[in-house]
Amino acid sequence: MPDNCILEMRGIEIQFPGVKALDGVDFFLRAGEVHALLGENGAGKSTLIKCLTGVNKKDAGTIIFDGKEISPTSPQNAIAMGISTVFQEINLCPNLTVAENIFVGRKEFKRKVINKRAQELMKRFHLDIDVTRPLSYYSTAVQQMVSIARAVDIQAKVLILDEPTSSLDENEVQLLFSVMRDLKAEGLGIIFITHFLDQIYAISDRMTILRNGHLVGTYDIGELTKFELVSKMIGKDMEAIFDMHPSEVKADASTMLNADHIGAPGAVHDISLAVKQGELVGFGGLLGSGRTETAEMIFGANHITKGKMEIKGKAVDIKKPFDAIMNGIAFCPEDRKRDGIIGDLSIRENIMLAVQARKGFLHPLSRQEQNELADKYIKALAIATPDAEKKIGELSGGNQQKVILARWMATQPDLLILDEPTRGIDVGAKAEIQRLMIQMCGDGVSVIFISSELEEVIRCSNRIVIMRDGAKAGELVGPFDGNTQNRILQIIAGEEVGA
Amino acid sequence: MSQKSHGSNQSLISRIMNPKYIMVYATIAIFLIIYAFGAIVYGDVGFTTLRTFVNFFTDNAYYGISAVGMTMVLITGGIDLSVASVASLTGMLVAFGYTRLGISPVIMMLFSVVIGVGLGTLMGAAIHYLNVPPFITTLTGNFLARGVCSLISRESITIEHPLIDKLAGFKITLMKFSEGEWVKIKPVTHINLNVLIFVVMIIIGTIILQHTRFGRNVYAVGGNEQSAKLMGLPVGKTKVAVYAINGFCSALAGIAYLLVVKSGWNMALQGGELEVISCAVIGGTLLTGGVGYMIGTMFGVLLKSVIPALITFNGHLNSWWGKIATGALLLLFIVIQRAVVTYTDKQKAK
């Protein structure tokens, strides 16, 4: 056993109906370390965390925390012992003020006191916000910071961060990391769960890898390269998975979309861009730089007030998403939980939605046609499900994303806009989605691909448009090399870096 | 981040402009507009006197008392359809207990408060621990209380007791200091016991909601019950307590109503629960939970009084216009609430 252990989990077993979710997993956390917990979706990370926080009962094994054996019975119970969790979904009350959210349920209570202390805490997070405003007034990133502030301000000895960075932009991630380093120095043990491999290497000291409910191993961060890590996570060779190249754009390809200085007040301005048939154009830039807004504008969700747009050489005036759909544009939004899936409908029904909308309600698809279409895409996209009638809400994130992709592919669009299609899904599914995009381009569909991970934008795109502060900051044309990432970062950063 | 810097010493203006108060401001503004309208049109026939204003409180005081508890229930995201029946049962118990059984009204009042709190606690427990939707649970409570009323008596029972007369007759005459001595305000204006109870309950309600740990838990439960649980808050206890408090308010409202009509009747206050709910909603309480203020509810009650007052002053209009106006107001407020929620969502997206 390593020294200085704050938390030892030994031989943890959890049985779910039909599956063994965890089978003899050991996990040791030292005080003052950031320990990454890794694995694909379904590997057992969440189950292990839920066992530690008292949500799921373990069937076998022991947990020793701070020298004593414990078996938490509920999240409250775990918090009281000093194990705090910050989840990917924000578990705060939107109607309470920032200060109230940090202090509700705790000893400090008077408005004046908590407002002052909350303001100080937020300063430590380098956020100068009005803590007396309701939480719902602020962006997701701020809300995430508030929930971390709440978790660490409780006298926690172990802090679990479950995908805390998935809604943060690069600056905010750095901010979070600096806070994590402070907390680490104070002797807190931090369990860090994320899909972003770069972040693991940037902040973690050690990592534990799980696969299919089994322990693969615990390693020091320097011990494994990124490739070895991913190979261990998926149990296959990584090289083969990510060996992909953008498809060639034909020299005589016609122009699919031509936007000339388009803009919408308050969102983005002065965007010029051309997308050829079969071309994959990646949008790079920070969160909030206007990538999504540009996509929404092309799709008609945000009305264009300036400039002109042409589709296949014809001037168009797209006022609402329906116009865009009728012009062969499809848009797969960023927040699939909110804007994309309808959890209680089946996979078939979810796939059918956009096709039916395009055909109009007077031309219903027969059940036969629906079944054929659904089965075709389940097969084509390798969606992991027993049949098309399963509720989409019961699928994993990666498979939900594939269903959304299928929904828009089924409309046979000429231009498909994908906003963060790979966020929050595991490595294997990510590679599959990327491969699908490239394959579609090969079939002559134009794709606009928005992602916060530059690496994947560079890997898949024929051309990259870089956004900054609501305007286009630059454009790079492939093929790309090892230097591309730096050039993009320079463009994002503006003149300061170049100088 | 686009949020402006505020610093710890924020200005009074920024504190007042806090978006969480928008709904309350809307209620007060609409009350003031209607009041100003009345003042301009009927100012010369006494609309602007203090007496008319105090009457806004007097007219619906029993609804107001009940609305204090209802506001808390609505903030937790629940609803209580039993309040009017429980109030009616209170009047019935006191009237029947004294007139037929000869038990002192004081004891019967205490007994009916115990019944109100007990029923509230039971319903709260069913809602939280058995996970029965509040609508169904309290609808059952409504039928139960109304049924017991009819079981006791299907006729109105008048109550004549010196204490009841004394309480009903209690009033404070408002005075002003003029030319070196205290004189009665003209026209003579009284504050009766019901108005006192109403105002005191609003103040107590405000203190509970804004300045106690319990009050903050009430808002948290209404904001996101799941989160509140994960934050380690006593969700179950809070919900049960809120329904118990509401049961207390219902019984108190029943006593206040008894002081007005001096009788118990099994069909008294029928549909009153909806009046109470509409007071809270017009006062800016969100039916979806999480938002609401006692001061807003108070103005909601005043708005419900000012409209019939206008009709009375007019003298020609059918009194049913009051219902129509209330309906229109309710609709207006639900639309405003929707607009505010949509607006803040949009703000956040930016």
Image (cartoon, coloured by chain):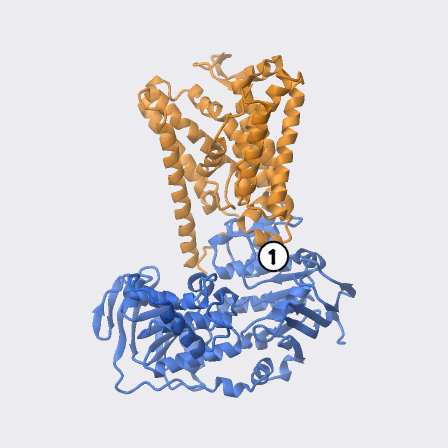
Q: Quadrant of the C terminus of chain A?
A: bottom left
Q: Position of residue B170 (x, y in %)?
A: 56, 16
Q: Residue at x 51, y 45 (%)?
A: B289
Say whether residue B177 is left or right of residue A111. Answer: left
Q: Position of residue A76 (x, y in %)?
A: 67, 55
Question: Height in image: B243 above or below A365?
Answer: above
Q: Give the camera-side residue of B78 and A171.
A: B78
> Residue at the spot x=38%, y=22% of the render?
B48
Give percent across and percent down for residue B283: 46, 37
| The N terminus of chain A lies in quadrant | bottom right
Q: Is residue B93 left or right of residue B314?
A: right
* Residue A153 visible within the image: yes
Q: Which chain is blue?
A: A
Instruction: Tell me the crowding category of disc 1: few under 14, some 14 to 19, or many 20 or more residues within 10 angstroms, Cα based.
Output: many
**Residue occupying the far left of the picture:** A314
Image quadrant assignment for residue A51: bottom right
Subunit that carries the residue with mark 1:
A
Confirm whether residue A494 shows in the render. Answer: no
How many numbered tags mark residues here? Answer: 1
**Mark 1: which amino acid?**
Arg
- Residue placed under numbered mark 1 in the picture: A150
Could you tell me which secondary element the residue under label 1 belongs to? helix
Chain letter matching colour orange: B
State whether residue A360 is above or below residue B293. below
Q: B214 and B135: which one is in front?
A: B135
Q: Quadrant of residue A4?
A: bottom right
Residue A251 lies, with reference to residue B310, above or below; the image says below
Residue lying at the far right of the rendered structure:
A68
- Measured along the vertical axis of the image, is residue A125 above or below residue A404? above
| Percent position of residue B310, x then y | 36, 25
